[in-house]
Image (spheres, coloured by chain):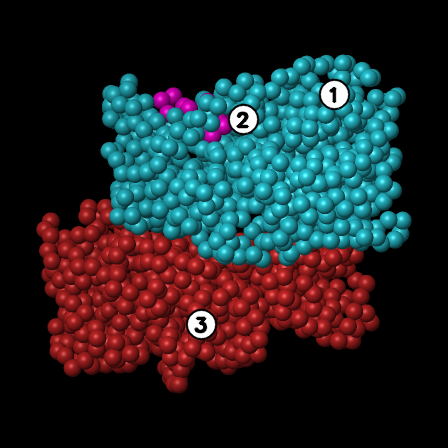
Chain colours: A cyan, B red
Amino acid sequence: MPDFYLSHHAAWGAYASFVLGTIGKGGGFALSDVHSPQRSVYVAYRQGQEAVRVLPFLTAPIGMGELAFQAEADGQARQAVAVQMVSADELERELGWASDEWRHGPLRLRLLSPFGDVPAPGSDEAAMKQAVCPVVLAELELDNRNGGAPAELLFALEGINRPLSDSTQGQLLGVASGSAWGVAALPGKGVEEVQDFDVIGATFGERRPRVRRLGNTGGVMLTVGAGEVGRLVLALGTYQAGIITTGLDTRFYYTRYFGKLEEAMSFALENAGEYREEARLRDAELAASGLSSERRFLLAHATHGYLASTQLLLREDGSPLWVVNEGEYRMMNTLDLTVDQLFWELRYHPWTTGNVLDLFVERYSFTDEVKHSGERRAGGLSFTHDMGVANVFAPPGQSAYETENLDGCFSHMTFEELTNWVLSATLYGLLSDIPWLRAQTGRLQACLDSLLARDVDGDGVMDADSARTEGGAEITTYDSLDASLGQARGNLYLAVKTWASLVCLEHALRVLGLDGRRAGERAGRAARRITEGFDEQRGYIPALLEGGSDACIIPAIEALAYPLLLGLNEAVSEEGPYGALVSSLRRHLGTALQPGVCLDAESGGWKLSSTSHNTWLSKIFLCQFVAEELFGVPVNPAWDAAHVRWQQLGSAAHGPTDQVRSDDGRDLGSRLYPRLVTSVLWLPRRGGAHDRTSASPQELQRAT
Amino acid sequence: MPDFYLSHHAAWGAYASFVLGTIGKGGGFALSDVHSPQRSVYVAYRQGQEAVRVLPFLTAPIGMGELAFQAEADGQARQAVAVQMVSADELERELGWASDEWRHGPLRLRLLSPFGDVPAPGSDEAAMKQAVCPVVLAELELDNRNGGAPAELLFALEGINRPLSDSTQGQLLGVASGSAWGVAALPGKGVEEVQDFDVIGATFGERRPRVRRLGNTGGVMLTVGAGEVGRLVLALGTYQAGIITTGLDTRFYYTRYFGKLEEAMSFALENAGEYREEARLRDAELAASGLSSERRFLLAHATHGYLASTQLLLREDGSPLWVVNEGEYRMMNTLDLTVDQLFWELRYHPWTTGNVLDLFVERYSFTDEVKHSGERRAGGLSFTHDMGVANVFAPPGQSAYETENLDGCFSHMTFEELTNWVLSATLYGLLSDIPWLRAQTGRLQACLDSLLARDVDGDGVMDADSARTEGGAEITTYDSLDASLGQARGNLYLAVKTWASLVCLEHALRVLGLDGRRAGERAGRAARRITEGFDEQRGYIPALLEGGSDACIIPAIEALAYPLLLGLNEAVSEEGPYGALVSSLRRHLGTALQPGVCLDAESGGWKLSSTSHNTWLSKIFLCQFVAEELFGVPVNPAWDAAHVRWQQLGSAAHGPTDQVRSDDGRDLGSRLYPRLVTSVLWLPRRGGAHDRTSASPQELQRAT
């Protein structure tokens, strides 16, 4: 069946996307947001005397905009153009890593959103200009080789209000909505711009002129001669001018290179060859990756969503500021997402992770007290959950999300954010930027102090909530999943993450020539405490180490990813210093991956918790990586196929969606989300390959 | 019954309004537009232990914004606040000229949109700063004198994302949506800012803190002590930064005085006393005007709509640029509206009319050819219909509206726009700016040449269409009314307007010391041609002088307004040089004002044309002025009451609406429109009074 899910098509760092994909719901440009504006998108063609074929991306009947002007006085009979709406099942679609292709008969529409390495600002201005240009490309092709008469092709949008030839002296043909977004082509044979209330009538009918400046729909048309193949390359551009954020004044970084929309679109069209080549390379790379078709889709879908939430800003001092916005929630640089998205960023632009970590230090760090046994004690350094929401930077030391006096959703995540900063910093520093890591020496020590201070009884597991919660209690990133994952104190998921943080810290300190034993020693205690939690009868470690939940949770293994990625093979080996922990987690996973435990009985997909039908794909992908890389769990196409169905059917209208029901994949939250790029971990690491041995669930469960 | 029509509350020249009025449809800020965003507006109060009373301005259940985050995991039982939605029939409302007051029990909400004289830019910076500050005020009052416990009051909006105390160090309390709009109060006893998903819960319930930065609703609350009357003054502010327009780069003029939203709101609150006094003066002036309650409403409603469409811009050379946008259509400085709105502007800020006329000359004038008997001939100077649409300036010499090859709606209005510029220029110049008029001497001659050239047979009535229409034909401003008024050639309405243009031109040239006889002579011929059209049997002049329509149209008398307002009493006297014309028009009007002719049989309101049920209120008001002032038609409360019903019932949801059905007042077009300020003509002219004699329709119809 056809794949009709919403997809974003976004230039890197522009926090703007061209949205398309769901039938009958249109799409269009979203600026500083990821929600579809649900405006009509006109993709249409006609061959010879046939009816005009219109792809099913309209949200309203053709030409309605004129009615407001015409009242009832317009009694004129007009020759209507014969139109045939293409039905969904006549369409073919293929999502590539950097492309999205739709086909109908002789028509091909390809949306290109190329991406790749982005060098650090200041190192290569030409590469940066190309990377940040706020434009994606559309390529249209109409094969009229069998046609005995000219054919016409149209790509047009609702919501525009001006032709681009006006402001460019004809150097660009197309239309725009004010100075904010537009679609443009370079002039060429058969290329015309169209603007009208009824863009179908203006393109395919007798109505002239083709530009009526009051029309609210418009785009570019191409006439293709008989016997020819017509090709049209379009720039889909956005431009957000001026100060974009409050709290901290910033502009878009691309304003350094482009003074306005037209300049960006011209640049993209002049360099279309390079953009197309970059898209082609990424598509080919994914096709040749060895990943299954299911995984290729999941990674490609995730990538489109991630790019849509990225935002490279320019501070008043000329320095860059990187933000990944949190999908539908629009929170800025949510630290629990940073730690998951760094797998992507370390591959293509590690400096953005460093940039975010620095801004957390500069503006969103604090030193708190903690609560334990009714008393206040010294806490230590930590970080806020996020930096603000919807282009509003929160005041220093505060997040948009966290609120006192709660013990569920919207409470503070002080401890987990501390582990997130530590893990992000050690991975970024050790894998990509040792000088930066060296500059963090004191801060890493302070983080270690803070981790230890929040573990009052010294068993390696956090037991004191930040005083910032006042009468409430800390939670984890799994805020809305279920109680098994939401509570921070004694949380198995967080305990393993704590252990991983201590292991990574110990390693980082040693690399820096310092004594990391304090960290290592506490990591050992944490490992023991977690291992003690293993329930031989159940075959797993219950989600809350101090009781209160029977849940079996997959994310117990999540944090193994960090030492694994640092190459700390001893630490994650069953023969190493934490062998007992690793063995228990292997056995835990074996139990989890049974139908009725953490495999959904209906869909066969992964449930993060045995006691919740709310499951999060980004975390599934991450845990799949650990399960496969470390424990030899084989790739199971049935699991991945279930996850594909969740995205393509259950949550199709919401684009890349993280929180879904584990039975039918229906969206539960975190729609239009960037975090699913954890799936990049499935790819062979760049410049290397990885060998795996394979293990069945039964093998996993064996006691050592 | 309660009056629940949409109203705009707008600062002068800010092209932004706070919209409120229709029940269950919310409202909120519209920026560079006049359509209601239909967001929830929270006006609520509680006395003692009673339920919270919430005024019916919500569009969604309370607190829904949180659901996207909570998925299904939030099983917590919360103590809900007892809420009682106030029903429409419990509310009282009173629209003043510069105010809009809502009352429920002890609550009073007054929205203030003061206006008044605005001196020309450069003459009084302090006055200009006060005039252009993009803020309107809301005053709330809660009478708790009978209360034995504290009471609380809330004014809050949906769609906000930050508390204002952050960016003002507490100097302002309130909330904003980015840097674009917000609501603010000065700090004071009992004043607190609130932001939450559930602003009712945060204000009246146990939820704390009152500011949760992720919340999408927020505003200002006031706690009122037992036995006290609490008062809260709020700034409702907007700020549109940077280059606002394309085609011609401009910013808002207010950016000269205010660097950002907070500065504008602070200024408005610091100067609240002066703004309130100005609003009070206007309200009192209207109350004491002697106008009936119906007319007071119609003028007040029109004024709110006009202000919402006004826009004072700043060009790159530092000069001002005035735009009145065309309501729902958003066309900029539509010249057929300029000529009607100058009655308002000549009263308060005549320089804006001059500014528009200058920009028409600079950028939107042209010299065309005309078509006559299949040949092209020299035409002359004329002007475009408008200057663009939706902040997009059209290229020089072109409008957004006009299209070739049409003979109905969207065709060219070249001849009528020529009369519009001439009438506007002569009124503005003669009544307000003689030096300006003198500078136009050559242009006035060119306009006269052009008027004459388009009357090829020399009978005073236009008979040659502009070649710009190509295969089409010129139309008039009554584009969507009916054929009786739409066609330009031989159009009675336009013929009288031509005569008036010639009369005014003759006078202007004479005032400038020049020979105006060419104009006067052709005016005489026009008067004869029109008078000859009088059909004694029917008792009126049919709408098309050369046949093709039997319609009787009220706007035949419209253009008498111009010589009348110039004080050319001879010209509009039945004893003067055009006495026969004036007599025929008197008799014409007498016939028109009969039930079944131009009085709607059902509603009793005025129909502009006997053959159309589409009627336009702005033009009715203008023609009422002529009918009363010149022909002594008495004010008829039944007519005005019908017109009030059209606005308050038929088109209530669309605010001030120009085009309505003459039976029930249902909107047909021109919604949210500025032109209804022609009703300002009903007021005594400033500094003078006018005496009228009264005439019945029968008296009007008498032959001379």
Mark 3 secondary-structure assignment: loop
Mark 2 secondary-structure assignment: loop
Left or right: B356 as drawn, with respect to A438: left
Q: Which residues are magenta?
A: A92-107
Magenta span: predominant SS is strand
Quadrant of the image for the C terminus of chain A?
A: top right
The residue that mark 1 highlights is A593
Q: Which mark is residue B180?
A: none
The residue that mark 3 highlights is B636
Q: Looking at this view, is B143 or B487 the one in front?
A: B143
Camera-near label (3 vs 1) is 1
Amino acid on which the number 1 mark rests in the picture: Leu
Camera-near label (3 vs 2) is 2
Does residue A106 show up magenta in the picture? yes
- Where in the figure is residue A539, as x and y percent of width and height? 83, 21
Q: Residue at x 78, y 27 (%)?
A: A578
Mark 1 secondary-structure assignment: loop
Q: Residue at x 66, y 34 (%)?
A: A659
The residue that mark 2 highlights is A686
